[in-house]
Image (cartoon, rainbow, N blue to C red):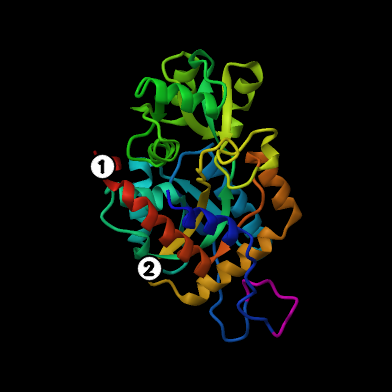
Amino acid sequence: MKKKVLALLLAAGMMISLLAGCSDNGGENASNGNDGDLKWPEKTIEVVVTAGAGGDTDFNARTFATYFEKYTGQSMVVSNNPGGGGSVATSQVKSSNPDGYRILFCHTGQMIINEVAELIDYSMDDFDIAGIPAVDKGTVLVASKDSGITSVEDLVSKAQANPGSITYASELGGYSHLQGLLLMNNADIDLRILDIGSASDKITNMLGGRVDLAAITYGAVKDYAETGDLVILAQYNNERNENLGDIPTFKEAGVDLVMEKPYIIAFPKGTDPQIIDKMNDVIEEIAADPDYEQDLLNGYKQPVDYLLKDDAVSLLSDIRDDYMQYRQMLTE
């Protein structure tokens, strides 16, 4: 994995872009704009989410929607469409009228990895990317109790001593599959990658001793770790997310691996640039809200982190270029 892209995510996550322009009426919400500007939003917006209800993507979409209404006065209705690993949702939004009232909320797995794995015949370039409103920094590598693996160092030692003997749970062709490939590449180990399914399926199989490892959000495994049924080995962040407690990063454990997961807001191609700019203004307003910060912490132990349109497109393009080196392995 190229260090350049990983460093970009950390550096870009700390950048705060200036507002695109200042209204003559300083008390107006950013969404109202200046006289003569396009007025948006003026009605309810449909947010098509590439994942089912109850997970981290859905949580971030619904949390954003709540605060969007606070700052614009217009509601967002979340529509979950997880079919085809998110490809049904991305196709739906891609073919929608670019009027600003149907948007896509997804993460890099559904926007970029689906392209890299050739699960879709279009790309992020076929959308107008509005920004990255949040970044998942709660994913951890977890081992089953039955595996006997107690740390990243222990994992590397055992995997190198017996290549292919340790199993890793994934959804083949998806985000967790790429996480496994990066782990093998960067730790110089050989794992047996299994197509297990959803996060709940992975947890069930680890608890049953049928699989050794999985990459899962911290909130989903915290209780099992506290009982000793699962062992959290490392977090995928460039620097420790202290909200997760005393969990080392891979880099601390000697493996140069970072894989933070940006969430993406995208509009159909051809959306009025003023709408994109107004969405950027709202993203900034929401990110500065202390209640929003607390909600992210309570939900998935996320710190506030975001990028506006230009930085988001640059970062996502670099991530895509880097992931392309794994295309053959993802499509085998």
Q: Are marks 1 and 2 in contact (CB under 8 Å)?
A: no
| Residue 174 occupies quadrant | top left
Disc 1 residue type (three-letter): Thr
Q: Nearer the viewer, mark 1 or mark 2?
A: 1
Q: Is residue 41 above or below residue 188?
A: below
What residue did someone put label 2 on? 269
Q: Is residue 145 left or right of 267 when viewed as pictured?
A: right
Asked if residue 320 lies in the magenta stretch, the reply is no
- Residue drawn 60% across the image and 21% down it: 224
- Residue drawn 61% across the image and 33% down it: 219
- Residue drawn 56% across the image and 26% down it: 151
The quadrant of the rendering that contains the C terminus is top left
Q: Report if residue 41 is visible in the image.
A: no
Please provide the residue range marked out in magenta: 24-32
Disc 2 residue type (three-letter): Lys
Q: CA distance from mark 1 to mark 2?
A: 27 Å
What residue did someone put label 1 on? 331
Q: Main secondary structure of the magenta part?
A: loop
Q: Position of residue 180 (x, y in %)?
A: 41, 35
- Residue drawn 37% across the image and 34% down it: 171
Q: Secondary structure at mark 1?
A: helix
Q: Which of 148 and 19 lies nearest the eye of the viewer?
A: 148
| Residue 121 occupies quadrant | bottom left
- How many marks overall? 2
Q: Which of 66 and 309 lies nearest the eye of the viewer?
A: 309
In the rendering, which numbered label is found on residue 159? none
Q: Position of residue 90 (x, y in %)?
A: 37, 53
Q: Position of residue 299 (x, y in %)?
A: 65, 40
Q: Secondary structure at mark 2?
A: loop
Asked if residue 27 lies in the magenta stretch, the reply is yes
Q: Is residue 142 left or right of 304 when viewed as pictured?
A: left
